[in-house]
Amino acid sequence: MRFTLTKNNLDNFIDKIKQLDFDKLWRVDVNEHKFTRSIEQNKRYWKLLKAIGDGLGYEPEEMDSLMKFRFLKEEVEVNGEKIVKIPSTTSLNTEEMAEYQKQIEWWASQYGFQFKEE
C-alpha cells in the first residue's frame, strides 16, 4: 500500500492500518515526500539538450542518453555481475533534476557552451 500522508487524511491512514491482517508482519517506511521533476524543468532540460546538441552535432535524444550515462548511471550487482543502470529522469525529484541540469551545464561549459535562458 502506498499512501501520501497529510494532516487532512491522517484518520483515513489510521483506518487503513487497522484493517491490516496482524497475523502477518508488516514493514512500514515513512519518508518525506519530494515532488518529481516539474513540467517546466522537463521543458528546460530538452531545450538545454537541443542547444548543446546543436553545438556538438548531436540530436537531443542522443544528448539525453549521453548525459544520463555521464551523470546518472549507477552500478548494480546482479548475481555477482556488475551492471550499469541508467535511470530515467522521470525518477528525479525537483531538487535532483535541478542539480542534474547544473551538472550538464557545467560539463558543457568546459567546451565553451553557455546556455541562454529565453
Image (tube, rainbow, N blue to C red):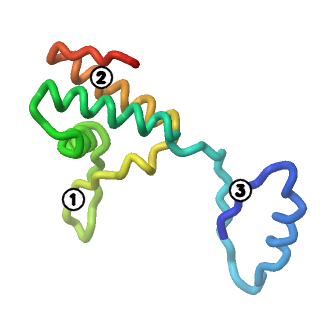
Per the image, label 1 sits on a secondary structure element best described as strand
Give the number of the mark in front: 1 or 2: 2
Residue positioned 64% across, 46% down in the render: 33
All told, the count of numbered labels is 3
| Residue denoted by label 1 | 83
Residue type, mark 2 in image: Glu
Q: In the picture provided, is 22 more to the left or to the right than 82?
A: right
> Depth check: 68 or 27 in front?
68
Residue type, label 1: Ile
Identify the residue shown where x is 46% and y is 34%: 41
In front: label 2 or label 3: 2
Q: Is residue 21 above or below residue 57?
A: below
Q: x%, y% of residue 115?
A: 30, 18
| Residue 20 left/right relative to 8 | left
Instruction: Label 3, secondary structure: give it.
Output: loop
Mark 1 or mark 2: name the one nearer the start of the chain.
1
Of pointers 2 and 3, the one earlier in the residue sequence:
3
* Residue under numbered circle 2: 105
How many neighbours does mark 1 have within 10 angstroms: few (below 14), some (14-19), or many (20 or more)? few
Q: Earlier in the sequence, mark 3 or mark 1?
A: 3
Which of the labelled discs sits on residue 4, or is there none? 3
Residue 116 at x, y percent in the picture: 33, 16
Relative horizontal placement of residue 107, taking residue 1 as reference (left or right): left
What residue is drawn where x is 37% and y is 24%? Answer: 102
Label 2 and label 3: CA atoms lie apart by 34 Å
Residue type at mark 3: give it. Answer: Thr
